[in-house]
Amino acid sequence: MALNLEQKKAVVAEVADAASKALAAVAAEYRGLTVEEMTNLRAEARKGGVVLKVAKNTLVRRAVEGTDYECMQDSLTGPLLFAFSMDDPGAAARLVKDYAKAHDKLIARLVAVGGQLYDASELERLSNLPTYDQAIAMLMGVMKAPIEKLARTLAEPHAKLVRTVAAVRDQKQAA
């Protein structure tokens, strides 16, 4: 069913809104996926904070003009679905990667982050980025380590003295 001009404008506005707020984008070929599989993919995307859009490539070209994902314009060919990560840069990549493991018809074609277009092989690297909570936990671990080491270093002379006194006591009791 063909879209009229107003419907096309609405699609462009929807995709442009998602693209302007997104941290990363992944375009994947979905040819061969059933309706049920696409519905499951959309449900997983909603859970993960990913916006999924399926639109004609000509409309997406217009929508991404002036956004960080303008770099994708020349590579849009074939039936593509667009996954935009809203909260976590790696969310869309994780979604596509995990779903592609179970459904070999879903094939990642383009990966874009921060105005840079990457090959589909970079999907793995992007999907391995830590989430916000994981990154904070890693940072806290790095910040906490020197303090813990200082506390252990300051406590060690006292502990060594106690161990020495205990060893002398044990030696005297044994004799």
Image: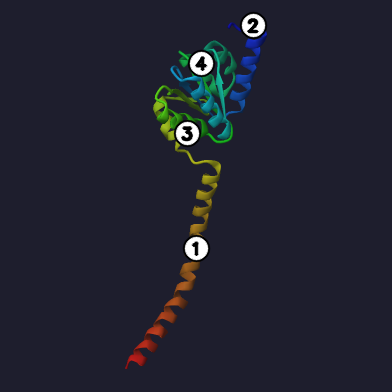
Residue 45 vs residue 69, the one in the foreground: 45
Question: Distance between the Cα atoms at labels 3 and 2?
Answer: 35 Å
Tell me which corner region of the image, top left, top right, bottom left or bottom right, holds residue 103.
top left
Residue 148 vs residue 81, the one in the foreground: 81
- Residue that badge 1 annotates: 148
Q: Residue at x 48, y 72 (%)?
A: 155
Quarter of the image with the C terminus in it: bottom left
| C-beta proximity under 8 Å, tags 1 and 4 | no
Furthest toward the right, the residue is: 6
| C-beta proximity under 8 Å, tags 4 and 3 | no
Does label 4 or label 2 sit earlier along the sequence? 2
Does label 1 or label 2 sit earlier along the sequence? 2
Classed neighbour count for the residue bearing mark 2: other residues with Cα under 10 Å, few (<14), some (14–19), many (≥20): few
Classed neighbour count for the residue bearing mark 1: other residues with Cα under 10 Å, few (<14), some (14–19), many (≥20): few
Say what secondary structure mark 3 lies in.
helix
The type of residue carrying mark 2 is: Asn
Quarter of the image with the N terminus in it: top right
The type of residue carrying mark 4 is: Gln
- Residue that badge 3 annotates: 94
Q: Which mark is residue 4?
A: 2
Question: Distance between the Cα atoms at labels 4 and 3?
Answer: 23 Å
Q: Residue at x 51, y 30 (%)?
A: 92
- Residue that badge 4 annotates: 73
With respect to residue 139, does 83 lie above or below?
Answer: above
